[in-house]
């Protein structure tokens, strides 16, 4: 899939683009915004074009001025410039900008329990599988993944539809005890009103989901956006042609899935199976 110009933006350029967009929507000139920020109009201009990096106090003031629903929108964008994130830049954009703002999320995972539904031990086992990753880096990744789960505990959580290949529950990630805990957690989350989990039979003839996992985010004030991951890279895109392809794949995979109640029964069977082997 061709990468959109937005996906190739640096963190500085993305901050500048967002600053310019919200400034225009607020009806402010660069001079008027600079006055409120306590800086020069030329600094605002340089930041908007990505030629200068904002400081954290600049970002904090932007969040106060624009008073967005996401109270740390500019702070997060600023931190992406100053910090060295653990994980690819495209995915950081997904977990910081897209996923927290989604009103609905649809995911397909052919190999693992999706990140939003992973237990701490399961996530740790996955990251420890990356041999080049230090233990400190592993713990940072695990902490970040557990932080992502908090969106499901909000008062207004996104509706979540999850498709998982049924063999994921047979794959001994971390061993029997880890898999027992993971299956129990999956069973609990699948019983929530806003979450639907469906397993896809291992013998399905559908091949659309074999190439990669992906996620689809429905947003209140932005186009549907997708995240597509492969072994070597990934991308986040709102381009209509890309979204159409991924939506089509999701729909075809879901037609092969077990019903939610049947899927929940199979998850509980996995709990019992892993319990017997611990």
Image (cartoon, rainbow, N blue to C red):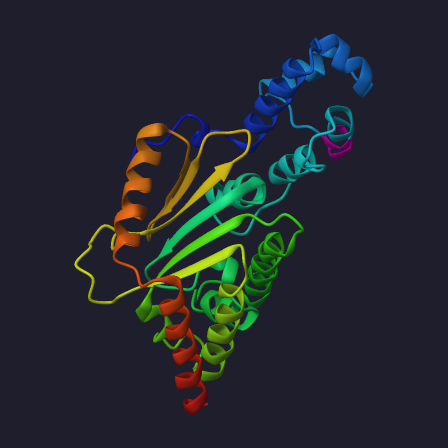
In the rendered image, which quarter is residue 6 located in? top left
In the rendered image, which quarter is residue 8 located in? top left
Above/below status of 58 relative to 247: above
Q: Quadrant of the N terminus?
A: top left
Q: In the image, residue 186 lies at what x, y percent?
A: 48, 68
Membership of 59 in magenta stretch: yes
Q: In the image, residue 50 lies at what x, y percent?
A: 58, 22
Q: Is residue 233 visible?
A: yes
The residues colored magenta run: 55-60
Residue located 54% across and 42% down the image: 103
Q: In the image, residue 210 lies at what x, y percent?
A: 25, 55
Q: Is residue 22 left or right of residue 278?
A: right
Residue located 73% across and 11% down the image: 41
Give the dominant element type of the magenta stretch: helix, strand or loop: helix
Q: Is residue 123 left or right of residue 277?
A: right
Above/below status of 175 relative to 189: below
Residue located 42% across and 70% down the image: 264
Residue located 67% across and 51% down the image: 155
Q: Is residue 40 visible?
A: no
Q: Is residue 267 left or right of residue 82?
A: left
Count of marks overlaid on the render: 0
Membership of 197 in magenta stretch: no
Above/below status of 221 relative to 152: above
Q: In the image, residue 249 lies at what x, y percent?
A: 28, 45
Given residues 267 and 31, the one toward you in this image is: 267
């Amino acid at each position: 899939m061709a990468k959109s110009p937005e996906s190739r933006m640096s963190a500085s350029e993305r901050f500048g683009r967002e600053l310019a967009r919200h400034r225009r929507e607020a009806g402010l000139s660069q001079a008027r915004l600079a006055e409120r920020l306590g800086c020069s109009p030329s600094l605002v201009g340089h930041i908007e074009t990505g030629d200068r990096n904002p400081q954290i106090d600049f970002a904090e003031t932007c969040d106060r001025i624009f008073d967005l629903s996401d109270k740390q929108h500019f702070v997060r964008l600023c931190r992406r410039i100053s910090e060295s994130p653990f994980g690819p830049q495209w995915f950081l954009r997904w977990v910081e900008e897209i996923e927290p703002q989604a009103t609905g999320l649809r995911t397909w995972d052919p190999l693992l329990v999706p990140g939003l539904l992973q237990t701490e031990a399961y996530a740790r086992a996955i990251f420890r599988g990356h041999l080049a990753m230090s233990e400190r880096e592993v713990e940072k990744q695990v902490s970040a993944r557990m932080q992502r789960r908090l969106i499901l505990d909000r008062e207004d959580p996104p509706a979540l539809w999850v498709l998982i290949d049924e063999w994921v529950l047979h794959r001994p990630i971390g061993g029997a005890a880890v898999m027992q805990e993971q299956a129990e957690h999956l069973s609990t989350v699948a019983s929530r009103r806003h979450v639907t989990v469906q397993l896809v039979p291992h013998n399905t003839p559908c091949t659309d989901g074999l190439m990669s996992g992906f996620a689809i985010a429905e947003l209140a004030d932005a186009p549907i956006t997708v995240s597509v991951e492969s072994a070597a890279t990934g991308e986040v895109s709102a381009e209509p042609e890309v979204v159409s392809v991924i939506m089509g794949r999701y729909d075809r995979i879901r037609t092969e899935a077990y019903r939610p109640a049947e899927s929940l029964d199979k998850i509980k069977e996995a709990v019992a199976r892993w319990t017997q082997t611990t």
